Amino acid sequence: MAHQGHPLLLLAWLATCLALASGETRYEKFLRQHVDYPESSAPDARTYCSQMMQRRGLASSTCKFTNSFVHAPAATISTICGSGGTPASGDLRDSNAAFAVTTCRLQGGSQKPPCRYNADVGSHHIRIACQEGLPVHYDRSL
């Protein structure tokens, strides 16, 4: 199978690099670490996790132990900070609706690349932290 470049993937990668170089906001970091919409394609969930963790800079120098990707538009996730969510504690809010979520967990004990991940795919309510009406931290799936 011939390798074909994907222009949108290249643009996303360049945008990520620029954000990392220029100092991203907490909201931009949330988007980079936790939002994948439309969901990136991969042959299986494990490959998806390994690829996404690498692409998003979460498995470059050390392997992040766990990370969740929400497969919904950023604007939809942001509604949790308002009418689409209910207060939990502090700045944490629980979503009123369930979201498609892929949670990637480091396989094995090594936190040095190459990183290999197991995947849990499901539909979950989520808990996020909000600041100034925007999501800034993914706390957990509920």
Image (cartoon, grey):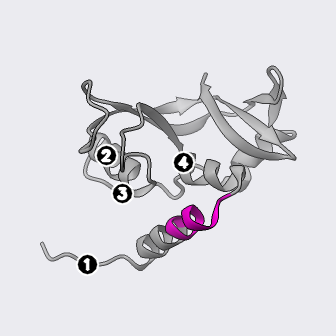
Residue 73: in sight, yes or no?
no
* Quadrant of the rendered image containing residue 80: top right
- Mark 1 or mark 2: whose residue is earlier in sequence: 1
Q: Which residue is mark 1?
A: 4
Of residues 97 and 34, which is closer to you in this image?
34
Q: Which residue does the image show at 36% across and 41% down from the upper left?
A: 62
| Along the viewing direction, whichever of 121 and 111 lies nearer the viewer | 111
> Looking at the picture, which amino acid does disc 1 mark?
Gln
Q: Which residue is mark 2?
A: 50
Q: Which residue is mark 4?
A: 33
**What's the residue at 26%, 43% (across, down)?**
113
- Circle nearer the viewer, 3 or 4: 4
**In the rendered image, which quarter is residue 91 located in?**
top right
Secondary structure under badge 3? Answer: loop
Where does the N terminus fall, quadrant-wise? bottom left
**Residue at the spot of label 3:** 41
Q: Is residue 37 left or right of residue 59?
A: right
- The part of the chain drawn in magenta is 16-24
How far apart in space, not on screen, are marks 3 and 4 (Cα)? 17 Å
Where does the image place residue 119, in percent across and percent down from the top left?
Answer: 35, 34
Q: What distance separates the C-alpha of mark 2 from that of mark 3? A: 12 Å
